Amino acid sequence: MKTCKHVKTKGLISIVLLITIAWNCENVKDWSDPEDNTKPEKVTAVEVENLHGGAMITYTLPPDPDKKLLGVKAVYSLREGGQEYEIFSSAFRDTVILIGFPDTNERRVNLYTITKSRVASEPVSVIIKPLTPPVELVRQSLKMDATFGGVHCSWENIMNENIAISLYVDSIGEMTLDDTYFSNASKAGHSFRGFPNNEILCRIVIRDRWMNYAMPLDTVITPLFERQITGRNDLGIQQWFLWGFINRECLSRGDNWRTLGTNSDITVLFDNILFDGGNWWYNGDDAGYLRHYVPGWSTIDNTYGYPAYMSFDLSKESFFSRFKVYMRARSPLFSANIFTKFELWGTNNPKPLVSESTDEDRLTNLRYWTAWPEIGGTDEWKNDWVQLGDYSLVLPSGATMTSDIITSEDEQFIRNGFEFIIDLDKNSIPCRYVRFVIKGTNYAGLRPGVQMGELQFFGSYAN
């Protein structure tokens, strides 16, 4: 019976709440007064601070003892004789900000106070003179250079304006759009690829969200020759390997090697099957346990060696321009173990291991090849290799951690594969061996386990 009374009480409370909400909805106060056509007083003490591509206008509102004032309306045009726009600011503010102007010409802006009965005051005219628009500032810093397989553009965007960078190329005497890249990063760059090693006339056009265009940049460029550095030869025979995996030398270098599960075959990394949920490489979450590497380490200790290392023998000396990493397909989309902070190093002549006849010999090798503090690691090997890049993986939304909520732009970014550019001054250094130094994954924990669907390198063979 107590339960029944409780249910009835809750039901009664719900009914009372619904009645109260309905009464309140029917009795929302209408602040307007159709009989009140009195014009409000105008704003005073108007001041202008010109901004890049806009202006900030401050003012003093008129006295409003009866609380009839709704706010202030600014009426303006982005271009001389163009469409008029209106922007409102409430009676709780004394500022209105205008943006989107394409040049530095003077503009007239009319300010009106508005009552809650929608009656406007007489206008107060003010002259603004916007500073150089953000899109023009970006254009001033724009650079265009030849890169492997295409054109590389770089720029600075100190206002973090949303801009579109479009590449047009000469196609039988007519400039045609090739692709467009969108960005609001303060310092950014993008490579438009897919071009042969032939001279091309190209044009870069920058615009902002108000369809303001900067002066185009035209130039003639010859893209550098680029091909995919494949993991298989012409007969389809696998040529790339985890360096030292077969004879377990990788253990002496501290390399992430332990392959677990059904999807552990390294060959799936280089078969050009992209974003296939059933075709991925995984070295196991326990791959980085120190007990796998250090003699005498407790077999039940689950301390990770950190950072983690992963090395590949690419079988041929090659010049690298870029590389791409594809995640394995799964749900949530950005939840497979993928490294988000890492370095890439390369060499042709790695130092041989110390011959291991004692446990101390193993430790000597590990101290040279790792930075693990538990064993006094020094990362001395970095003095003998060349750093090809230092990278952070950030989604377009800014996310760096696993999340069930990913924007459509993030999703497309993930499916396209994560592209990383080799430092431009290292493009001419031939390397056969590459080594990843993994400083973090997309998980909160320091788990060196890695899952990848595909790993691709681009550039050219040294011989």
Image (cartoon, helix red, strand yellow):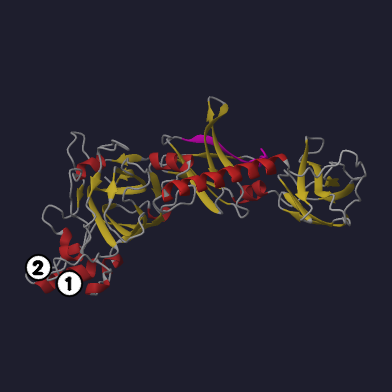
Residue drawn at (41%, 39%) of the image: 149
**Quadrant location of residue 298?**
bottom left
x then y, percent, for residue 457: 32, 45
Please tell me how crowded label 2 is: few (under 14), some (14-19), or many (20+) other residues with Cα within 10 Å.
Answer: few
In the displayed structure, 236 sits above or below 247; it is: above
Residue bearing the label numbered 1: 364
Q: Earlier in the sequence, mark 2 or mark 1?
A: 2
Residue bearing the label numbered 2: 356
Q: Are marks 2 and 1 in contact (CB under 8 Å)?
A: no
x then y, percent, for residue 26: 71, 39
Q: Secondary structure at mark 2?
A: loop
> Is residue 8 located in the magenta-colored stretch of the structure?
no
Q: Amino acid at mark 2?
A: Glu
Tag count:
2
* Magenta part of the chain: 199-215
> Is residue 204 located in the magenta-colored stretch of the structure?
yes
x then y, percent, for residue 38: 93, 44
